[in-house]
Image (cartoon, rainbow, N blue to C red):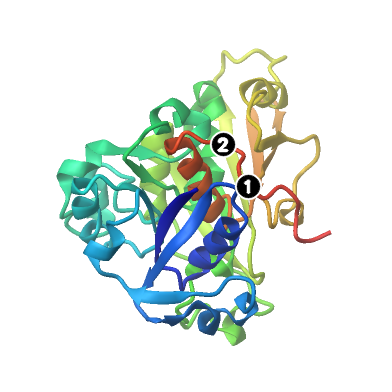
Amino acid sequence: MVEVGVVGAGGYTGFELLKLLRLHPVFKIGKLFGRKSGRIEEFYPGFKGVLEGIVYPAQLEEIAQFELVFLAVPHKTAMEYVPYLLEQGVKVIDFSADYRLKRENYERFYCSHRDPKNLSRAIYGLPEFFREELKGAKLVANPGCYPTATLLGLKPVVEFIDGEVFVDAKSGVSGAGKKVTETTQFCEINENFRPYNPIYHRHSVEIEEKSGVKVTFVPHLMPVTRGMEVSIFARLKPEVDSRWDPTTELKSFYQNEPFIRVVNHPAGIKQVTGTHFCDIFAMRNGNHLYINVVIDNLLRGASSQALVNGNLIMGLEEEAGIPLLPSLP
């Protein structure tokens, strides 16, 4: 068994991570840390009798006693933990954006980076593209939901795309976290649908960094708790053969990937909610390309992705403890 530490146990992604760790064949929850202390079943009454324990104040010396630590903390916060933990030989999986971007791009959208020396040590946590680098990594920058869904649909076909890509992305409101805001309270989100931070959203630069193409990215909030649907629109290069088929291309690219399903009909969020799967549908109309991607924003877009990365860096089977059956019919 490998005991792991979890920092940020009280948030939605922390909740999902604890559910996964409770059933993991190798990882065992060693200690929970958070901004608020108390018993975990006080945060989540449904854990009572199944997963109980104390959430302790986050003290670096206490966190550093574990070989592997999951940092489910907000952006700008992970930098307070990572330097010390790496110095103590701890392997870290960071849920925030603090180590995902080049320094100049991070500082453009977030704040001054206080740990630039470790930026080059971080491995971007999308196994489909960085699996070998993740094996034995010390610091993993776990991608969020929007970049994950977009990159999984976009990267395999980048070489065929001409010019800018347009991304129309929609997320369940759980992606905004537990903190209530004017736009996420029930009266605002119920029976409503809206874009937010269009065009200049901070995830646009992350998608551009990792894909190598210019994107116009517009996110939206759906009046559902969880799930994500991303629609990608692009033009194909003039030289692309008229017989080239995006579905065939994607199936070939992902033929050995256990958690990618290339489907023959447009995908809905219910078919992946509660799982680690990413379902992708694609079609072309002349030189126009459309790609439809669905994931569970809290799992594939956060917690189960972190667990896959934890499996890889600890030398375990990638599929260990990963949810495969949807929670909705």
User: In the image, is residue 282 above or below residue 185?
Assistant: above
> Residue under circle 2?
318
Residue depicted at x 36% and y 75%: 56
User: In the image, is residue 291 above or below residue 248?
Assistant: below
Where residue 30 sits: x, y (%)? 43, 61
Number of labels in the image equals: 2
Q: Are marks 2 and 1 in contact (CB under 8 Å)?
A: yes
Residue depicted at x 35% and y 35%: 137
Neighbours of disc 1 within 10 Å: few (<14), some (14-19), many (20+): many
Q: Secondary structure at mark 2?
A: loop
Residue depicted at x 65% and y 24%: 256
Q: CA distance from mark 2 to mark 1?
A: 8 Å
> Residue under circle 1?
322
Where residue 71 sits: x, y (%)? 37, 58
Image quarter for residue 76? bottom left
Residue depicted at x 52% and y 84%: 42
